[in-house]
């Protein structure tokens, strides 16, 4: 290995040592305070809207993984370059670590849930990185300044006795080859320990220990159509789409849980998790969908939710008459704003604790999330919910509204072809065409399919249990040989037909008919 490569690896070892130490320190402070997590979260918050849309469109639910890989790659390249430069000027290495520590600490302090201790992991990490740098890079003695010479003493010498060979000399410092190996291994080990200790073990056990009470009121059970390839009527928890800004999943322990009802209310309240479970809970099937869903997209799911009715809680808190917005706040500071009038108009708005018979999964808001049928998730479905603040639409802009998304976003009527697959070859004759359609809180009354822009054909619909759930549909197509375009459109319970005109998800939800092209032969 050339001296350059060793120096590059030494740079990576310093950065790795810094990040691993910080990861370990973050176990004691908070998972979100680790520098990569904090910087990643800050990047998510600062990303301009078009880039964010691009990321969701391109990477879907893997957007966070892609971000982490991106940050990791940038760090790796920068660390290698700094490692090489540090041979000539060691100050470059110390300066780079100082920048890493400062940026990490600043990003962590900027998180909504942060207190001053959140700066510590980044600072401790930078200090450890500096120590590794000091240990690895040393000034060669004049006598060693030719290749193959052995150093007399290095800082490592106190840790392991045998002298080691040094790299071809460059003016400046030389890097201890074996020290690099030790430092890389050490950083890896500390990183793994930090990662494991910071894992979800404790919160998983807390979730396993939750016993959900029986609901006081049980809603009807819907059912689906039996067609191969159609979206299942109820979405299993493991398959339910996930959208949020949380790079590190918030860990909210039921034992410490407090929900605060604050702001423009006559009677501010605090409820424990137990207080919520002890209320008369309702269980309802509700379809949740995301405003970022594209035509034909799958950012929607249907589950049986168990929760405390929101309207009753608000009634107890007695909102001021002018408090037209309920701001719901998550433990990581994310906010949504929902019209008070909609929360209290009789629909099944709830603070959910259960999803398909289980406590909420971690990724879906454990232990408590909000749900309001008929509204997109970003204006209603706050996960890891810790506060309801009665406010007004003039006084407060929640997270996505500050980023120019619409403040009041009812779900748009939507229909999707699940089968046949686009561009797939099908047989001729009877081919089932099927999918789902939704228009939460207005309901789906009709779904129509057409072939090659011919006349519309009415599809068969699954039995309806209410306006808040999606409906599966099915139509039997008599396919003739050749390439064909299939299109679908739905009509909601108010008689409005889904518009053909294509609109992007920004700022209040996509529109347009979904189509697939298939070849029959
Ligand atoms: N705390 C928090 N809650 C949140 C979000 C978020 O970013 N943070 N995203 C919202 C959005 S945009 C949607 S579409 C739904 C998605 O809920 P799910 O991940 O359970 O499907 O959660 C909502 N609740
Ligand atoms: Mo969303």
Image (cartoon, rainbow, N blue to C red):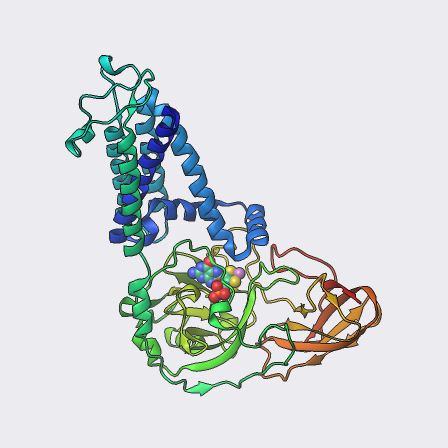
Closer to us: 485 or 333: 485
Q: Quadrant of the N terminus?
A: top left
Residue occupying image coordinates x 36% and y 69%:
367
* Residue 351 on image: x %, y %: 42, 73
Q: How many numbered marks have been drawn onto this rendered protein structure?
A: 0
One can see residue 296 in this view: yes
Give percent across and percent down for residue 324. 49, 66
Query: What residue do we see at 79% from left, 70% from top?
Result: 450
Q: Quadrant of the C terminus?
A: bottom right
Query: Is residue 451 depicted above or below 308 in this figure?
Result: above
Closer-to-camera residue (84/359): 84
Left or right of 474 on screen, residue 267: left
Q: Is residue 224 above or below residue 402?
A: below
Q: Is residue 379 visible?
A: no
Horizontal side, residue 227 vs residue 239: left or right:
right
Residue plotted at (84% across, 70% down): 480
**Quarter of image, res 248:** bottom left
Percent x, y for residue 412?
Answer: 63, 66
Give above or below for 28 relative to 382. above
Please indicate whether residue 446 sits to the left or right of residue 38 in the image: right
Query: Among all residues in the image, which is located at the extreme top?
Result: 142
Q: Quadrant of residue 156?
A: top left
x and y, in percent, of residue 25 in the image: 25, 48
């Amino acid at each position: 290995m050339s001296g350059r490569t060793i120096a590059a690896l030494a740079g990576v070892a310093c950065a790795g040592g810094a990040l691993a130490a910080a990861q370990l320190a973050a176990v004691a402070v908070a998972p979100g305070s680790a520098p990569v997590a904090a910087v990643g979260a800050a990047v998510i918050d600062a990303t301009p809207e078009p880039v964010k849309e691009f990321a969701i469109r391109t990477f879907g639910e893997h957007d966070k993984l892609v971000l982490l890989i991106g940050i990791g790659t940038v760090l790796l390249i920068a660390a290698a370059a700094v490692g090489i430069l540090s041979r000539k000027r060691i100050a470059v290495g110390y300066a780079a670590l100082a920048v890493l520590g400062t940026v990490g600490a600043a990003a962590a302090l900027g998180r909504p849930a942060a207190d001053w201790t959140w700066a510590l992991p980044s600072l401790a990490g930078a200090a450890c990185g500096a120590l590794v740098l000091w240990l690895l890079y040393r000034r060669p003695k004049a006598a060693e300044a030719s290749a193959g010479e052995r150093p007399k003493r290095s800082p490592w010498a106190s840790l392991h006795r045998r002298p080691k060979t040094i790299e071809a000399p460059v003016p400046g410092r030389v890097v201890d080859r074996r020290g690099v190996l030790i430092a890389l291994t050490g950083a890896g080990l500390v990183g793994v320990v930090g990662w494991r200790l910071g894992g979800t073990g404790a919160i998983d056990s807390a979730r396993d220990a939750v016993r959900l009470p029986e609901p006081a009121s049980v809603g009807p059970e819907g059912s689906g159509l039996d067609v191969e390839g159609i979206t299942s009527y109820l979405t299993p928890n493991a398959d339910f789409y996930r959208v949020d800004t949380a790079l590190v999943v918030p860990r909210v322990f039921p034992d410490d849980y407090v929900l605060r009802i604050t702001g423009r209310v006559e009677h501010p309240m605090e409820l424990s998790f137990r207080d919520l479970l002890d209320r008369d809970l309702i269980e309802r099937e509700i379809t949740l969908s995301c405003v970022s869903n594209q035509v034909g997209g799958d950012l929607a799911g249907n589950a049986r939710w168990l929760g405390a009715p929101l309207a009753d809680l608000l009634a107890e808190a007695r909102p001021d008459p002018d408090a037209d917005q309920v701001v719901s706040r998550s433990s990581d500071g994310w906010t949504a704003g929902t019209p008070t009038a909609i929360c209290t108009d009789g629909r099944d708005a709830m603070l959910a604790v259960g999803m398909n018979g289980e406590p909420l999964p971690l990724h879906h808001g454990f232990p408590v999330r909000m749900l309001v049928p008929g509204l997109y998730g970003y204006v209603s479905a706050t996960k890891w919910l810790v506060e309801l603040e009665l406010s007004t639409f003039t006084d407060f802009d929640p997270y996505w509204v500050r980023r120019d998304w619409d403040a009041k976003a009812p779900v748009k009527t939507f229909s999707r072809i699940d089968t046949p697959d686009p561009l797939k070859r099908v047989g001729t004759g009877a081919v089932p065409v099927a999918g789902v359609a939704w228009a939460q809180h207005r309901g789906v009354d009709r779904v129509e399919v057409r072939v090659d822009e011919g006349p519309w054909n009415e599809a068969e619909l699954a039995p309806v249990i209410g306006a808040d759930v999606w409906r599966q549909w099915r139509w039997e197509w008599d396919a003739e040989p050749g390439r064909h375009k299939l299109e679908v459109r739905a009509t909601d319970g108010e008689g409005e037909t889904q518009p053909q005109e294509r609109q992007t998800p920004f700022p209040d939800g996509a529109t347009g008919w979904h189509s697939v092209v298939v070849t029959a032969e």
